[in-house]
Amino acid sequence: MPELRRITSADVARRAGVSRATVSYVLNATPGQSISPATRDRVLEAASGLGYAPSAAARTLRTGRSDVVLCLLPDWPIGNEVGNLLGNLSTALAREGLTFVAHPGSREDRPIAEIWKAITPAAVLSFTDFSDGETEAMQAAGVALVVALLGRAGRHALELELPQQLTGRRQAEHLTGTGHRSLGYAYPDDPRLRIFADPRLAGVRAAAGGEPVVRTVPLDPVAAAVAVDRWCAEGVTGICAYNDEVALAVLAGARRLGLTAPRDLAVIGVDDIPAARLAVPPLTTVTTDQGALAAHLATTVVAAISGRSAPLLSAADLVRVVIRESA
Amino acid sequence: MPELRRITSADVARRAGVSRATVSYVLNATPGQSISPATRDRVLEAASGLGYAPSAAARTLRTGRSDVVLCLLPDWPIGNEVGNLLGNLSTALAREGLTFVAHPGSREDRPIAEIWKAITPAAVLSFTDFSDGETEAMQAAGVALVVALLGRAGRHALELELPQQLTGRRQAEHLTGTGHRSLGYAYPDDPRLRIFADPRLAGVRAAAGGEPVVRTVPLDPVAAAVAVDRWCAEGVTGICAYNDEVALAVLAGARRLGLTAPRDLAVIGVDDIPAARLAVPPLTTVTTDQGALAAHLATTVVAAISGRSAPLLSAADLVRVVIRESA
DNA sequence: AACGCATACTGACACGTGTAAGTAGTAAAG
DNA sequence: CTTTACTACTTACACGTGTCAGTATGCGTT
C-alpha cells in the first residue's frame, strides 16, 4: 500500500529546487515580490505535477481568515426560490474566489457560536438579524463581515429588504392597474415567515390606494374558503398572496365557494413555482431575477471583505410580473 | 479602543495557573490523563470566564481532521423535501457534535476539489457519485468518509437508493391495490433528475404487475395533455408520477382533455408538497419520513467516521401513502 | 573604487492546537 | 532502602502556511 501523505508546499519546493517561501510567493502571486519567469514556471509545473492543494486549515490559522462565506439558513422550510438564490450566490462568490456554504437547521438545537467557530468564515450571512453580543463575538473571532439580509432595521445592511418590498409593490400595481380598488393581503399561517411577509406587505401598502384587508390564510382549502368568504363580504376583489402556495390556497378556497378567478376574485402570487402554471386557473405571479440578485449580493460581500464600499442595488428591473389567468 | 485579540488556550492556562497542556486535557476530556478535580474546576471556570473558543483551524491543522460534514448539492433546483432532509440531517449531526454545511451550485463552475480543500471536512456527502480519482484525492487529503447517496452502484454505500425505490413501490402498490391493471410512469423532463427518477421507476417496475408505460412529462399543461392522450389511447388508467409537480402537470393535461381524476385517470405523486392538497382534485401522494431518514444518515456518517460499522436502514415504515382524491 | 539599488531569492518565525515523552512527588510493595 | 506504580502535571514538538527581514548577485551611477 502506497504511503498516503498530504502533499505540502515543501514537497513542491523540493521538486522545483527552490525554497518554500518562493513557492508561496509564486502560488499566491504576492505583490511586491520579484520572481524570475523561469523559476515561476518551474514552481507552477511542480505544483500541478504533484497535485498540490494548500491546506485551508493552515492558511486560515496563519492569516486568521478563511475564504469561506457562511450562510445561516432559517429553520423554516426553504423553498425552491431560496434554494435558487443560494445556488446563484454560490457561483457568484466562487467567481470571486470565495467558497459559499450554507448551514441549515434551527438556531435552537445548536448555538450559532458553535458553527462559526468550527468554520472561521470570512463573512456570515443570515436572514434574520443577530444580537449585538453575537455580532461582537464574531468580529472578535476574526469574522470580517456580518450581514443580516432581513429583520429589524439596525446598523446592518438589510440587502434583501428592498426586493421584498418591491415584490409587494408589483403585486398591488398589477391589481390596481387591472381595475381593482379594494385589495386583500393573504398573510402566511406560519409565524416564522413574517420576516419575509412584513416587507412584502409593506410594499403592497405603499402601492395600493387604500389599506389592504390583511387576513391569515392556512394552506388548507376549507380554512382558506372561510377567509375568502369574508373578503368577498367586505367587497374585496383582488388578493395579493404572500407567495404562490398561499395563492393556491386562496384559489382552492374560492373554488369551494363556487367562485372562479379572475372573474369573482383576482389572485396574484409570488415566486412562480412550477405548480403556479399548472393551477386552475394558471396563476399570475411575481418573479425575481435570482441570478441578478445573487450577483449583487456577491459583489456586496466581496466589497465589504476587501474594505471597499458596496454598490447600490438597482432593483427596478429585478422583479417582474408573470401574467397568466388568475389576475 | 480595546485590543481585539483572540482568546487562546494559553490565556486560559495563565488564568488557571496551569500549563497549556493541562487545559487541553481538561477541555477535551482526554482519556488516560488524570487531572485533580480542583484544577479541573479552575480550568473550566477560567475557560468559560474568558469566553474561550478553540480555533477550529488550529485544531484541524493539528489533527488533520475537522468536525465538519460537507454535503455537495446538485445543480438542479433543490425542492422543499431535499431542504427538509438537509435540515433534519443538520440537527441530527449536531447532536453528534458534527457541523453540517451544504455547498450548492454546479460542479462545473468550480471544481469540487476547490471546495473540500477550503473546508477539510471529516466527511463528504454527495447525491451523485464521484470519479475514482476524486475519491482518492479526497482521502489523501484526510477526508475520512466519502459517500454517494445515489448513482451508479459502485463500492460506495448508496444510502438513499433504497428509500427512492421504496417510494416507487408504494406508488404502484396503491394503484394496483385500487384495481388499476395498466400503469404509466410520468418521467421528469429535466435530465438531471434521472438520478432520482431511475430508482423510483425501478421501484414501480418491481411492484407493478407488468411493465409500466414510461413517458416524459414536461411541466406544461399543453405538453402534458399530449402525453395523457396517448396513455389513454393505450388503455393506461393509473399514473405514477416522478413527483408532485409532474403529477400536477398530468392532472392539468388531463383537465385540458376534459378528463377528471380519479374517474378517468388515477394519479399519484411523490413528496406531498403544499400545493398537492390544494390541487384539483387534491393529490394523492407518497411521503417520506425525512426526520427518520436523516437520523439514519447521521448515525451512518458518525459510525463511519469513528470506524464502527453502520446499522442497516429499516426502510419499511419510512415511506407512506397520503390518500387524497386523485387516486 | 565606492555606493546605491533593483532583482531574485532564502531562513526563520508565528499562528493555536493535540499529544508523546518526561518529571517531580507520593505511596505501596518487595 | 530500593523498586515499582501511580497521580498530577509540564515541556517540547509537529501540523502547513504566510510573510518579515535578511542576503547574494548584478548593474548603473557618482
Image (cartoon, coloured by chain):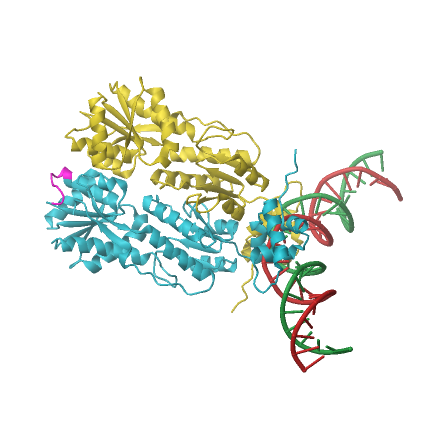
Chain colours: A yellow, B cyan, C red, D green
Q: Nearer the viewer, residue A34 or B1?
A: B1
The answer to whether residue A321 is left or right of residue A315 is left
The answer to whether residue C8 is left or right of residue A55 is right
Asked if residue B199 is positioned above or below residue C4 in the image, the reply reads below
Quadrant housing residue B39:
bottom right
Can residue A128 be seen? Answer: yes
Q: Is residue B289 magenta?
A: no
Q: Which residues are magenta?
A: B255-262
The answer to whether residue B296 is left or right of residue C21 is left
Asked if residue A244 is positioned above or below residue B303 in the image, the reply reads above
Magenta stretch: dominant SS?
loop
Residue B277 x, y percent position in the rendering: 22, 41
The answer to whether residue A169 is left or right of residue C23 is left
For the point 11% across and 38% down, which residue is it? B258
Residue A4 x, y percent position in the rendering: 54, 63
Q: Nearer the viewer, residue B139 or B70?
A: B70
Can residue A41 be seen? Answer: no
Q: Is residue B259 magenta?
A: yes
Quadrant of the image containing the C terminus of chain A: top left
Q: How many marks?
A: 0
Residue B256 x, y percent position in the rendering: 15, 37
Q: Nearer the viewer, residue A234 or C17?
A: A234
Residue B5 x, y percent position in the rendering: 64, 42
Q: Nearer the viewer, residue B10 or B254?
A: B10
